[in-house]
Image (cartoon, rainbow, N blue to C red):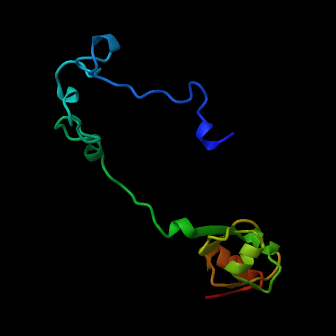
Amino acid sequence: MRLNTISSAPGAKQAEKRVGRGIGSGWGKTCGRGHKGQKSRSGGFHKVGFEGGQMPLQRRVPKFGFSSRKARFRVEVRLDQLTKVNTDTVDIAALVKARLIPKWAKRVKVIASGKLDKPVSLQGIMVSAGARRAIEAAGGRIGE
């Protein structure tokens, strides 16, 4: 087999539709565009969302909210998950190593869900008010 002898399988390549080549082709005269009107003309298409001068839906509907770019890198950790970390100080690196959060997480917040058995020391992690009370009640401390 040589490169100049290779060809596509039969039926794999379909010929491009040639319009405006006579009545017998089935695509003669108007070339499948119908008679008259904007869509029959060359360049006769309007922009996406255009409704003929009527106020488009995109502008009629009220706008609300936004997507925070910081929220994409924020992860929540429950109190009972902190017991799975086997280090003295719990920080983002320790949580990643314990596979509690993904590697891409940049901000972590501990939420008050579940029970905390042992005292933990948090470093560089945000905590909710309820989680703060639970950690301090268990004898742990929270560093900035």
Q: Left of 60 or right of it: where is 53?
A: left
**Count of labels in the image:** 0
Out of 43 and 14, give the one closest to the viewer.
14
Of residue 32 and residue 110, the one placed in the foreground of this image is 32
Instruction: Name above or below for residue 4 compared with residue 77.
Output: above
In the rendered image, which quarter contains the N terminus? top right
Please name the residue shown 79% across and 86% down the image: 88
Point out residue 97 in the picture as x, y percentages from the top left corner.
76, 75
Query: 52 and 45: which one is in front?
Result: 45
Could you say which quadrant of the image residue 126 lies in? Answer: bottom right
* Residue in the image at 18% along x and 35% along y: 52
Q: Is residue 123 visible to us here?
A: yes
The image position of residue 120, as x and y in percent, is 76, 82
**Residue plotted at (56% across, 29% down):** 12
Residue 115 horizontal/vertical position (percent): 77, 69
Q: Nearer the viewer, residue 78 or 18?
A: 18
Q: Residue furthest top?
A: 24
Q: From the viewer's perspective, is residue 88 above or below residue 104?
A: below
Question: In which quarter of the view is residue 77 placed?
Answer: bottom right
Residue 101: percent from the left, percent from the top?
A: 69, 69
Q: Give above or below for 123 relative to 97.
A: below
Left or right? Give the position of 144 relative to 120.
left
Name the quarter where the C terminus is drawn: bottom right
Occupied quadrant, residue 130: bottom right
Q: Is residue 128 visible?
A: no
